[in-house]
Structure formats: C-alpha cells, structure tokens
Image (tube, rainbow, N blue to C red):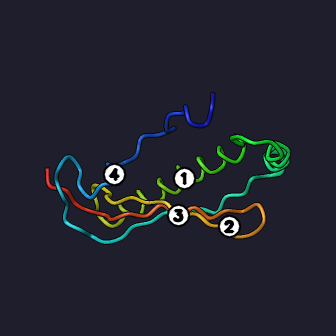
Amino acid sequence: MAADDRAPTTPLALPVSTTFEIDGRAGNVLGPCFGVIARSMGFTRGVVGGVKSLKRGNITEYSATLEEGRREAVERMVDHAVAMGANAVTGVRFDSSDISEGIVEIVAYGTAVVIEN
C-alpha cells in the first residue's frame, strides 16, 4: 500500500482543522499549540532512497518517513492542546527543516480553542 493511501493509525482526540472554524463555529482561543518531532531516515531507508533519488519520481522511502513524522507531530500538537484544556485545534500548519544530514525536524502548530457545543 502506498504511503498516500494509508488511513491514520489512530483517531485524534479532538477535531483538527486548517481553517479557523470547526463546523462554522469559531472557538474561544486558548493560545498556540504545537508538536515537534525530529525524524531520521534510518540506514535502510536512506540507502534505498538515495539509490532511487538517481531517477526522477516519488521516493517512497522519504515520503513515508515524512508522513510518519507529520502524523506524530500532529498527535503531539493535539496532546499539547488537550493539556491546555482545548477541545479543538484550528489554523493547523506544518513546517519542516533539516537539522543535520539525514535528520529532519517536523513541526505541526495551530491554535488551541474551546468550541461550545
């Protein structure tokens, strides 16, 4: 199964949206929340990905590593929001950067909010 076809492994504890509303309702803002992960390719994925990079196209080893990192960063962001007392996260964005050779930092961040039922 391709990395893009996989469903999330576990449901998130609360709604997460890239918009600034959930179901048309804006929430009471608690503040920014984030989740950070540093992810390494690992030896096997790095070697296979390096060989595949000689050709054009998607390098599934790199894509899978980044996807796993984004999922974990979102899970950590949600945990942070829950600890703040939020019941949703809005305005979610991602950022990533190289820390060193073969290691990437992935950040998921958004606004922790309380949406009234």
Residue 67 percent across, percent down from the top left: 58, 47
Q: Do the residues labelled 4 and 3 touch (CB within 8 Å)?
A: no
The disc, 4 or 3, on the residue closer to the chain's N-terminal end is: 4
Closer-to-camera residue (13/32): 32
Instruction: Count neighbours of disc 2 (C-alpha within 10 A) and say few if under 14, some if 14 to 19, many if 20 or more.
Output: few
Cα gap from disc 4 to disc 2, whole angstroms: 26 Å
Direction front: furthest residue: 56
| Amino acid type, label 1 | Arg
What residue is rendered at 72% in x and 62% in y? 103
Residue 71 percent across, percent down from the top left: 52, 49
Disc 1 element: helix
Left or right relative to 67: residue 45: right
Q: Do the residues labelled 1 and 2 touch (CB within 8 Å)?
A: no
Residue 21 percent across, percent down from the top left: 23, 55
Give residue 100's quadrant in the image.
bottom right
The disc, 1 or 4, on the residue closer to the chain's N-terminal end is: 4
| Amino acid type, label 3 | Asp
Residue behind mark 4: 17
- Nearer the viewer's eye, disc 1 or disc 2? 2
User: Which disc is residue 86 wearing?
Assistant: none
What residue is rendered at 43% in x and 64% in y? 109
The disc, 1 or 2, on the residue closer to the chain's N-terminal end is: 1
The disc, 4 or 2, on the residue closer to the chain's N-terminal end is: 4
Cα gap from disc 1 to disc 4, whole angstroms: 14 Å
| Amino acid type, label 2 | Asp
Give residue 88's quadrant in the image.
bottom left
The disc, 1 or 3, on the residue closer to the chain's N-terminal end is: 1
Residue behind mark 3: 95
Disc 4 element: loop
Residue behind mark 2: 98
Disc 3 element: strand
